Image (cartoon, grey):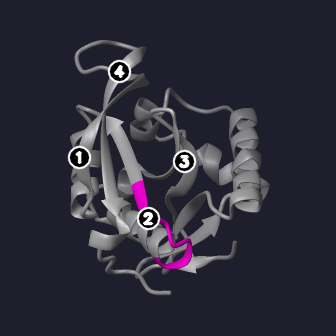
Amino acid sequence: MGTRYSSRLRLEPIGPQRADDLWLLHQDDGIAYWYGGRWTHQAAAETAAMMERGWRVDGVHKWIAYRRTTGELVGRGGLSYGDVAGVRRLELGWAVRGPFRGQGYATEIGRAGLRFAFHELNAEDVVAFTERHHHRSRAVMERLGMRPIGELRRPGLVDGRDGVHDDAPFVLYRAARTSHRVRGTSP
C-alpha cells in the first residue's frame, strides 16, 4: 500500500490524509462535469476513508497523482473492485486536472494500474468504462491496449441532454493479462 512511481508521477494511495487533495481535484470544472458536480469537503473525506478501506481489505484502490518534479497535484486513478454489470470486477479509472490534460498523464496512470493488476495482483483481466460520448477517456483506454467488449447502462451523462440520467450508455473496455503488455512504468 505504499507510494509508487511512474516516469513523471508519484502515486500515493488515497486515505484520509489525502482528503483535501481529493476535494481540490473534484473542484476542477472538467472533473466535476464527468463526476456529478463539485464535491464537498465531507464527500471528499468520506470517499477518502472508503478508498482507504479498499486498500486495507482488497489491497487495491485509487492513487492521488503528483508530478515527481514539482509535487503539483495532477489527478487520481488506479484500480478498485466494483460491481460491473452484476459481476465484481477489477476496474481501472483516472481523472486529470485541466492544466495537465492532453499531456499523457491519464495514460501514465492507467499503465501504472495495469502493471499493478497484471504483475502484482495476478489479475486475469481489468475493465474500464465511460460514457459513450467521452471520447478522450475512450482514447486513453485504446492507448492502453484495452478493447471494447460491450455496453452498460448506469447513472451518468447522455450526449445532448442535461443532468445525470439513470440509464446513460457506457462503453465497457477490457484488457486481458494474456494478451497485454504493459510498458512505460517503473517499479
Magenta span of residues? 119-126
Q: Earlier in the sequence, mark 3 or mark 1?
A: 3
Q: In the displayed structure, does residue 93 sit left or right of residue 131?
A: right
Q: Secondary structure at mark 4?
A: strand
Q: Earlier in the sequence, mark 4 or mark 1?
A: 1
Q: Nearer the viewer, mark 2 or mark 3?
A: 2
Q: Secondary structure at mark 2?
A: loop
Q: CA distance from mark 2 to mark 3?
A: 31 Å
Above or below, 10 against 54 in this view is below
Q: CA distance from mark 4 to mark 1?
A: 17 Å
Q: Which residue is mark 1?
A: 148
Q: Which residue is mark 2?
A: 124
Q: Which residue is mark 4?
A: 168
Q: Amino acid at mark 2?
A: Glu
Q: Amino acid at mark 3?
A: Leu
Compare residues 169 and 27 and report the one nearer the observer: 169
Q: Nearer the viewer, mark 1 or mark 2?
A: 2
Q: CA distance from mark 4 to mark 3?
A: 24 Å
Q: Earlier in the sequence, mark 4 or mark 3?
A: 3
